Image: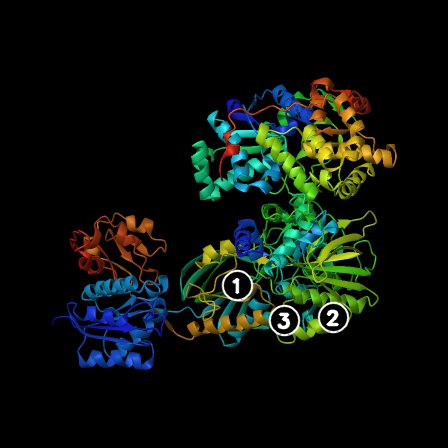
Amino acid sequence: MDPRIGVYICHCGLNIAQTVDVKKVGEYVKNLKNVVVVRDYPYMCSDPGQELIKNDIKEYSLTNVIVAACSPTMHEQTFRRACSTAGLNPYLMQMVNIREHCSWVTDDVEKATEKAKLLISAAVNRVVYHEPLEKLQIPIEQSALIIGGGIAGIEAALKIANSGKKVYLVEKSPSIGGRMAQLEKTFPTLDCASCILTPKMVEVASNPNIILLTYSEVKEVSGFPGNYTVKIVKKPRYIDENKCIGCGICATKCPVKVPDEFNLGLDYRKAVYIPFPQAVPRKYTIDREHCLFFTKGVCRVCERFCPSKAVNFEQQPEEIVIKVGVVILATGYDIFDPSVIKSYGYGRYKNVYTGLEVERILSASGPTKGKPVLRDGRVPKTIAIVHCVGSRDERYNSYCSKICCMYAMKLAHLLKERIPDSTIYEFYIDIRAAGKGYEEFYRRVQEEGVIFIRGKVSEIYEKEDGKLLVTFEDTLLGVVQTIEVDMVILATGIVPRSDAKDLVRKFGICSSADGFFMEKHPKLAPVSTVNRGVFIAGACQGPKDIPESVAQAAAAASEAMVLLSQSTLEVEPIIAEVQQEKCSGCRICVSVCPYGATIYDSEKNATRVEKALCQGCGTCVAACPSGARVMKQNGFTDRQILAELEGILIPLKPRIKIEVTSTG
Amino acid sequence: MSEVITLRLLEDSSIHTAIKKCIQCGTCSASCPLSHYMDYTPRKIVNMLRNGMYNEVLKSKTIWLCSTCYLCAVRCPAKINLGEFMISLRRHALSNGYNNAQEYLKLIKTYAEFIEKYGRISEAMLMINYSLKTNPVKAIKMIPFALNLMKNGLLSLRVEKVNDFQVVKTKT
Amino acid sequence: MGMNNSIGYYPGCSCSKNGLAKYYGESTVKILEHLGLKVSEIEDWNCCGSSLYRVIDEKKAYLLAGRNLVLAKKKSVEKIVVPCPACCISLTKTLQKIREDKELEKKFVEVYNTGKEDLSRIVVKHVVDFILNDVGLDKIEENVKNKFEDLKVGVYYGCQITRPYASFDDPEFPSSLERILSTTGVATIESAMKTKCCGGLLMLTNEEEVLKIIEKIMNSYIDRGAQCIVTACPLCHLNLELAKNILMKKYDVRYDIPILYFTQILGLSLGLESRDLGVSREDFEKISRKIVLTARR
């Protein structure tokens, strides 16, 4: 039977029709070989549009369908489904992108129309060589891996675990809690951060579906969506987690003081420690870098006093290999290092702080037990808060860090509350207070007497007595002024984690220009990534406050559960195939495959393609010295590609001299 | 102000960039060692241009008070080189006959004469010529300093002439 | 160093033999020669145009500055050492502009028969950058003969040496000069004003305002016990000298401290004669008590 092709040209409203003359294209296509029906329609993807195709398949007994519309990443699935319902194998359909490739890239109607004709002509030539293909079904591992134990990771873990699936929650520090655990109160409601966070942390610890791996990091990832194998390294705590009862006698007895990371170096912890009182798990950790036994071979006081004999200096890093179906990255953010802005003197001037440092100072479990005092013990009476430090600044980060305006105002409120006779200035460029109750909070803080000055601080100068001179232009007055303050707080922005690139590589996802993880679609797939089985939640995707992070975590959990709720995962059949009997066993394909999908079988002295692993990139097929005789890329066979080329080149023949010889 | 002048002004790349990119944060003004003596802060100058106040800008003292120390330029969060911006504004003021910065214009004129004649300048001669043109009394006050220079062998009144210096006659 | 032939020297008007900073130029050349680096002055160089000529005619200003680059290129010079920060900016800016501005490049080809490809290999370096990063501290330390004992030196960079194009040091808090001077044994005095502008050419047009600024700058060093101030810029030096004379009349001898070029201190330390370095007898007397002879290792 001769091929019978139906061609469907979409207007995409005006997106295509404005620049591509669809009627002319239709006239041209009508006369091409094997084309039996041509239609154009304002929205091919709409129900009536799809109905057209379905009816024609039956009425004209179509053997192939061509849809000339948008990018296949948008609607290939839509049209495949339409064909499928009408009884046509979906892989006998081909999409031609006349929007992104024609109408959107030029205003020249003639040229865009011409190109659309050629691309469709190429597809007409190609589809006759299409073969019916079937999707593969691959079983899904019924568990999730969540990386990062901050509020986003915790939320996602609880959601998935509560749906009855197994969750591995990996956190690199000794306790979960993340940045939120470091905060005093949360804007705009002023809930105590620990009070609302710790119940969730405890829930994580007690949920039987959650396997909590703290002080652990992901070392290697292999596999594919639905079936990942992940190697995790659990760093030695030198304390047996099963024996430690969290009594803290070890820390009381430990003679070594170390700057406390959780309190940002504002005070000291011991060499054996828990990061903060509400830590989960409440298991102590020996800091190898500072412990006297590890540095000098002496002491062992903790070991002597531990009532449960939990100290074990012999502990080794432990490698754990797990299998999971989906992954959620919730790795959070780093704080911008303001010491690079030399004119602000952070790191040189003792009374210049970051916002997060002040959170710790104001926290009841912080270095001053919540008393708002400076490093020298004085209570600051005049305080300058500088917005946009490291954000909205093309020298460092162009983006707005989004949370700083709000946390800066929250800090102003808390300081004003605790030091009622203080004068507090907020130096801002624009106040970003978009969110439920945020603008109201801004009004409230202003009414409380905090002084808002529109102007960025240009420099800070430390006087001999430790007071700080802050110079700025009040841009609403157009006057340059210098004021003396006791304390400066830099509302530092947030930046991607220093190891973000490493995770991008390990999990085969992308990052955007600013370094944060990239979502699959900024509007419609905000927690998905280019890797079908990997989702992202929280500030690792971009600056975000707590409510947004929690919402994203729930979204990522639900996306993950959509996958986990299926027993198998459909995989595209557009993959490589080997004719084993003709394979010479040279293994070049094995060396070039980026996914480890080409596997050499020594018994047969031939390669085979592991269907679940193959991503259809075609590298092996191109590398095979025997070419099409042995290897074939379904959906992109040599014959199909060459026919496609001919379809473009032959109509141009009068203008271009070409020789095409088909080999495949 | 004529449209042609306005257009030329706005097409000047350093002016154009500032108008396009400035976020009006005032870092430049607050970094400027001379902003206290200016009639408008540098940030305001950019905003005035945005609002079409070309005449006021070219008449301002501000544009002549910039010492091109570039502190604003290295601190600007929009990476605007405001030093270059000020030089450009001076050029437009000069070429359009705004002569409210007499002293500076005389300095430029003296300077240009040297360049055109010799290809090099002599600072000593430049200072003397300039002082005589602007403030002869001050020129006399400078005598002790000049004597001191002379004592240290620094007061050369010679200028070496550059050979082959056709560039200065080039039409641009 | 194997690249001696390709190092050009551009004195600029101030540091040339008829300029007010001729001793800066001379001491620069002397110490480089002493350290075994032959630099050859770009023959028939002309004024860089500074920021002034750009006010008159922008394109011609680039052609003016560019003429020096073309002359350097003809002698196959790849690195130009410049003592004056303003000249450095003019030359660097011109190189940058030729790269970006096609029309200007066309003009260069028309006037000099030289395009951006020809000039692209030229690097313009301030002498501080050159001494620290090309000559290197090791080389200097090997050659130091005299160490200053407890001479308190205020290190004043001025503005343009690290701004806006230079990348060899922090634009606001540089440390190159301190590192170079550390080899001479002096105690350097830190000041928050060290890269604040001296007022530059505005000294001529707006003396009153500029004097206030320089007074602040000098105070910041003298308050901290500086016994002399070193600069690396001819204009900073001149302005500080001018201001010093006025301030001494207005106040007292507090401002009577030597204003030197860093190359003069370095030269003395390398054992060069004060006469050859252009250090005046008065100034030499004020600092020479602090010099001790270091026995060669």
Considering the image in quadrants, where does the C terminus of chain A appear?
Answer: bottom left
Q: Chain of mark 2?
A: A
Residue position for label 1:
A541
Q: Nearer the viewer, residue A578 or A233?
A: A578
In three-dimensional space, the C-alpha distance between marks 1 and 2, rounded to whole angstroms, equals: 32 Å
Q: Chain of mark 1?
A: A
In three-dimensional space, the C-alpha distance between marks 1 and 3, rounded to whole angstroms, equals: 26 Å
Label 1: few (<14), some or many (≥20) within 10 Å? Answer: many
Q: Residue at 80% across / 40% down in the picture? A: C215
- Of badges 1 and 2, nearer the viewer stands 2
Q: Percent x, y for residue C41?
A: 56, 23
Q: Residue at 55% across / 40% down in the picture? A: C93
- Of badges 1 and 3, nearer the viewer stands 1
Q: Nearer the viewer, residue A429 or B46?
A: B46
Q: Percent x, y for residue B24?
A: 64, 59
Q: Percent x, y for residue C242?
A: 77, 33
Q: Is residue A187 above or below residue A629?
A: below
Q: Can you tell which quarter of the image residue A130 is in?
A: bottom left
Circle 1: residue type: Gln
Q: Which circle marks residue A446 in the picture?
A: 2
* First in sequence: mark 1 vs mark 3: 3
